[in-house]
Amino acid sequence: MDINEIAYLGPEGTYTHQIAVMRFGDDTRMIPASTVFDACEHVKRTLGAYAVVPIENSSGGTITSTVDLLLNDPALTIMESMTLIVKLALLARGNEDVEIIYSHFAPFKHCSKWIRENYPAAKCREVSSTAEGAVRAAREPKSAVLGSKKLSEIYDLKVLHYPVEQEIVNETEFILLTSEETRNGENNGDKTSLAVELVHGPGSLCSFLIPFRDNDVNLTRIISRPIYGVPNEYAFYIDIRGNRDDDVVKKALKLAADHCDSLRIIGSHKHAGRFRS
């Protein structure tokens, strides 16, 4: 897979940016996008472009903006996934008292006890990304950011604490996306992602899942999301073990398709590895 350009959920210094560089190298052109939607729009209008976006955090859960795009945009396809094991730092302009801590919601969730014990008077303010928090901490006195240690180099911040104690494991899964046109027939890996809309009626989900059980195809993820403009009906994002070209997978998909309104393969892909921040 020849990759020259990657859009990522920015700004510079986010964990998405960090894992994109770790996975694809400093020589790859990196293009920050303000939202997952913007990153995906870039790959759709730019032949040969790819995007790295988060899909799930180990405690914060599913990144619904990513899943919704995958369910509703047939032009997108998943090429691979990767995992970042996250270590957090508390960064500020200097040693002044910290009255405000900025971060994305997920780091706050992982470190709430540590913050209460070490900065009980500080106000925690959620922002769109840890990099946005770093921008604010760099310009506002008596403020800090909870995020990657790498942010200190980019935004000229001092590391007050590293690593910050986390109450639970903190891992984020990311996916590499491109357009169906750019994919150009590539089909590798041992996991396949599906977008499914079921027949509306009792037992429809059960009927859809039985062919996977009967053909020994394991489901590793199933997420329900509301269908745009259709109250009380849901689409499903599903990950299964196996490649779309495996005989048992093809058989299970063919039988399952009889029990749904639509079934679309978002991609068969590999896991590219676990990285440490």
Image (spheres, rainbow, N blue to C red):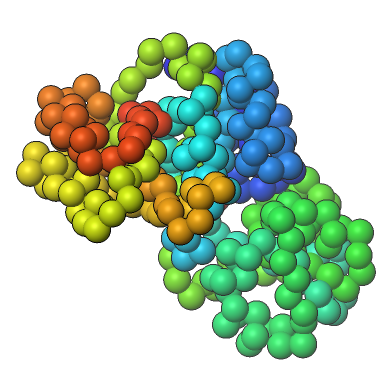
Please state the total of marks drawn on the protein image: 0
Q: Residue at x 72, y 83 (%)?
A: 119
Q: Please determine whether, in this image, residue 157 is positioned above or below residue 124.
A: above
Nearer-the-camera pick, 64 or 5: 64
- The reply to whether residue 54 is in sight is no
Residue for point 19% across, 29% down: 254
Residue furthest toward the front? 201
Give the residue drawn at x 36%, y 31%.
264
Q: Quadrant of residue 195?
A: top left
Q: Nearer the viewer, residue 238 or 61?
A: 238
Residue 144 on image: x %, y %:
79, 67
**Farthest residue, direction left:** 214
Left or right of 95: which side holds 102? left
Q: Nearer the viewer, residue 15 or 181?
A: 181
- Residue 57 left/right relative to 122: left
Residue at image coords 14%, 47%: 210
Q: Is residue 184 left or right of residue 143?
A: left
Q: Is residue 16 visible?
A: yes
Q: Using the rendered view, name the quadrant where residue 48 is placed.
A: top right
Q: Where does the image place residue 100, in percent across and percent down from the top left?
A: 81, 74
Q: Quadrant of residue 3?
A: top right
Residue 241 in the image: x percent, y percent? 23, 39
Q: Quadrant of the N terminus?
A: top left
